[in-house]
Amino acid sequence: MSPHDVVLIPGDGIGPEVTDAGLRVLEAAGAPLRFQVHHAGVTAIEQGLDVLPDSTVEAIKHCGVGLKGPCTTPVGEGFTSVNVQLRQKLNLFAAVRPVRNLEGITTRFDDVNLVIIRENTEGLYSGVENQVTPDVVMSMKVATQTACDRISRFGFRFATLRQRNKITVFHKANIMKLTDGLFLRCAQQVHQSEYPNIAYEEMIIDAGCMKIVQDPSQFDVLLLENLYGDVVSDLCAGLVGGLGVVPGANIGEDLAVFEAVHGSAPDIAGQGVANPLALIMSSVMMLNHLADTRNDPACRAAGDRIKTSYNRALADGCHTRDLGGDLDTSGFVAALLERLD
């Protein structure tokens, strides 16, 4: 098959460093990809472009797939998150975050293997905020049956295809009876009418977070609305070593963007010490997505080679500084490539 065109957004801060590292690994593994570089975030602004240029959005629509480094988001002021804009403009309604233990990385738990599926387009992240009076502001939580049905169906379909056994919905419907109540009803209906073979449970989110840190092995697939999914996915990353060791995907009906979910870390940008693993893991998710959606076994083979190589490198103690080791970015890539079959 011809190479698959993929939009590459290097991002800000350490983004260009980790994406360059990822490209080296993908090329060495023989991944059948051809990249088109487009920009977003602070990097785009510095080039005189919008924070999310129309050209970047249109390129992803044309190629169908993007790979993205971290982009800076100002806190409390400035432009809207690039990630939020991408998800809304491209209707990437499902965030998928696998979280599992990696051999060689010691954590409090050794039996974590779960997936967080997060609704990506509404809730409090809809961005509907108003100043009521000079000293009063309001943020509106938006929930629609269309979006709640869609993410519920995606979650159960994902669990079925990945041979997962149980879905747990975290909610706060005891307080937010209309919005979270709608989310719950949609999940219940999809479970009962379409996927009764998948075990299903519901849990109030504060109790659910407590149970996660008590024993994460009791969970399999977590299905959450937008804000809850954002918080819980980072919490779960902390169970296995942090945001530097987990991948992320944002998936719609026909489009998908894969990304390192950690920050742009401007304090270490340009020093060559950033851990590229999350971006590399996300690129493996991208290859598996291409294998599934475009029936290309070469993508699956390349993804399997990369996953095997970074598992071996980590098990052998090849760690960057954030994981307690002394390897820099290029050193970790070299260790990975040495183990690439």
Image (spheres, helix red, strand yellow):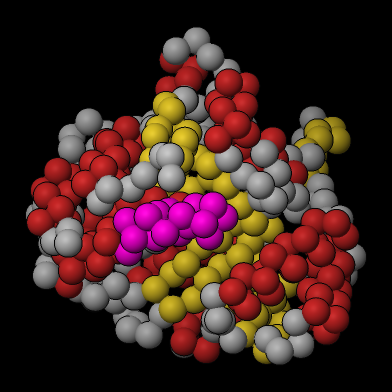
Residue at (32%, 56%) from the top-left corner? Answer: 302
Q: Is residue 206 left or right of residue 113?
A: right
Going by the picture, which residue comes out furthest to the front?
1
Residue 158 lies in what quarter of the image?
bottom right
Q: Is residue 68 left or right of residue 184?
A: left
Image height check: is 231 above or below 200? above
Q: Main secondary structure of the magenta part?
A: helix
Magenta-span inclusion, residue 156? no
**Residue 132 shows in this picture:** yes
Query: Is residue 77 shown left or right of residue 281?
Result: right
Where residue 226 appears, as percent x and y from the top left, is 67, 57
Residue in front for this viewpoint, 310 or 183:
310
Say whether residue 209 is visible: no
Q: Position of residue 252 (x, y in %)?
A: 66, 50
Please provide the residue range marked out in magenta: 287-304
Q: Is residue 202 above or below residue 49?
A: below
How far across and how far down the image is residue 293, in percent? 57, 55
Q: Quadrant of residue 101?
A: bottom left
Residue 289 in magenta stretch: yes
Q: Work out which quarter of the rendered image holds the N terminus and state it.
A: top left
- Seen at 76% across and 87% down, the residue is 196
